Amino acid sequence: MTKVLVLYHSTYGHIETMAEAIAEGARSVDGVTVDIKRVPELVPEALAKSSGYKMDQAAPIAVVADLENYAAVIIGAGTRYGTASSQMRNFWDQTGGVWMEGTLVGKVGSAFTSTATQHGGQETTLIGLIQTLMHHGMLIAGLPYAWAGQSRIDEITGGSPYGATTITGGDGSRMPSENELEGARWQGRYVAETAKKLVG
């Protein structure tokens, strides 16, 4: 079996929802198993609760040692001032040993994100995450224009050739649209198919 990890950080549930769609797409590929895990939260629990963080996320907490078990790792985090959330950055900052051992070299890496606005740093966040994966020697799979949904102009929508995205709105009230979720499913399936070919 080809194993895929969807690894995410989600503050208000937008990235969690996208992660589930990514996993759904990956699971649609025969011979692929998928785990969803999240990185540890760094914000103190009392502050997280008072700030309205989504506290009831079902995904278990990942540890760095988990990474070696997968043929592909798809990472998702919200954007903070044009880069990935510190929670996701903190997790990858602990992977020096993995890098030294070359554990992820030749495996498939991919990324997805969210922002409050259409021009809030989606692509810079994705490229930053992709750079980290490339330093680990991973082969990058994005969201090609073969998925036509990112070319739509009849509605506001996320989507980038670098990875699936969603737009949350300034107050966080907008959850991923069906088009954005379809992009996430497409990306998950594409990553799983690519990893399966490499493992096969």
Image (cartoon, helix red, strand yellow):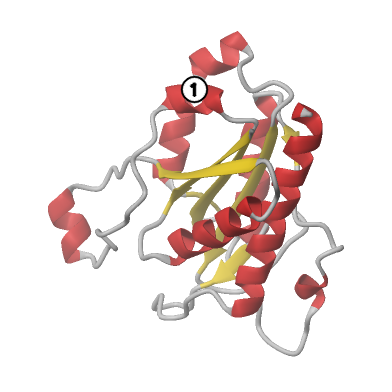
Position of residue 26 measured from the top left corner of the image (x, y, whole percent): 64, 51
In terms of depth relative to the viewer, which is nearer, 68 or 159? 68
Q: Which kind of residue does numbered mark 1 sit on? A: Thr
Q: Nearer the viewer, residue 144 or 160?
A: 144
Q: Is residue 34 visible?
A: yes
Please identify the quadrant where the C terminus is shown: top right
Rendering coords of residue 75 (x, y %): 55, 45
**Where residue 199 appears, x then y in whole percent?**
75, 28
The image quadrant that residue 128 belongs to is top right
**Does residue 86 lie above or below 180 as drawn?**
above
For label 1, count other residues whose C-alpha is less than 10 Å away and answer few (under 14), some (14-19) or many (20+).
some
Which residue is label 1 attached to? 95
Quarter holding residue 104: top right
Residue at (65% x, 62% y) in the render: 185
Q: Quadrant of the N terminus?
A: top right
Q: Residue furthest left?
A: 46
Left or right, 43 with respect to 195, comes to left
Q: Secondary structure at mark 1?
A: loop
Q: Is residue 171 above or below residue 121?
A: below
Q: Position of residue 118 (x, y in %)?
A: 62, 74
Q: Which residue is found at the position 39% from the left and 43% from the top?
A: 87
Q: Residue at x 60, y 70 (%)?
A: 181
